[in-house]
Image (spheres, rainbow, N blue to C red):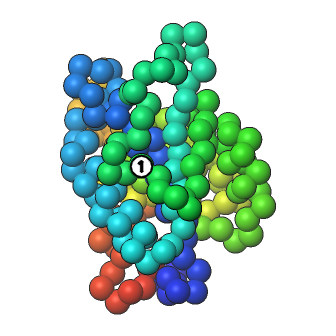
Amino acid sequence: MTASIDEDPPILVCADLQTEYLTEGRSHVITDAEEITSRCLELMTIWRNNLWPVMHLKRIAQAAWFNPASNLTDWIAELKPRPGELAFEHPLPSAYSSTRFTEYMSNMRSIRCVLLGFSLDETILSTVVDGFHRSHRYQVVSDAVACRCRGVGDAASYKRAVVKVIRNYAGIQASAELIGTSGKMAV
């Protein structure tokens, strides 16, 4: 379905764009982070320039080993929320583990969300599965998502497998397919 952005722009949902995924030596480091960060910034810029809604998700673990004073959970500087943009912290992988996020989403009618960011195999996967069971529509931007792939031999194959699972619960599109030169958005 192709919809004019002026009629009903979807919400851009930015998942876990935090510095811990860029910090060398961390088990959470994303190997293709520079490419994914650049694509996320490109899409976020389009949304912001058109004044379309942007929402940010931030994973805040509540385990005993979690240090809330650490700067590893800080937003990536160029991708952090701006005034007027929604931001939700979630303690478990799914964004629906945030009461505020769940309430916000349950009060929206016919909402469409375009999802990008890090933690593909945790936050993005669990959020689209939870959203699917609540009749919320998600579209995942396949070339603007990444996962850490710790202990996985072939990271690209792992990512493809996770995207294949997500396809059962959400639409999958490349960024070039999402935003065309015609000013129409295909979601």
Q: Is residue 104 left or right of residue 152?
A: right
**Front position in the image: 159 or 87:** 87
> Height in image: 165 above or below 186?
above
**Looking at the picture, how far across and down is residue 127, in whole percent?**
59, 45
- Name the spot of residue 36 as percent of width and height, x first: 28, 50
Q: Which residue sits at x=42%, y=49%? A: 80
Mark 1 secondary-structure assignment: loop
Question: In this view of the protein, can residue 164 be seen by the observer?
Answer: no
Residue 62: image x %, image y %?
A: 60, 20
At a point 57% along the width and 10% down the height, the residue shown is 64
Asked which quadrant contains residue 183, the reply is bottom left
42 above or below 120? below
Identity of the residue furthest to the top in this view: 64
Residue plotted at (21% across, 50% down): 35
Neighbours of disc 1 within 10 Å: few (<14), some (14-19), many (20+): some
Q: Residue at x 58, y 15 (%)?
A: 63
- Rendered position, 153 above or below 77: above
- The picture places residue 29, in percent across and down from the top left corner, at 29, 29
Residue 49 at least partly seen = yes
Out of 48 and 177, give the one closest to the viewer: 48
Viewer-proximal residue among 115 and 65: 65
**Mark 1, residue position:** 80
Residue 156, image quadrant: top left
Residue extending farthest bottom:
182
Q: Amino acid at mark 1?
A: Lys
Relative height, residue 150 to residue 32 (above, below): above
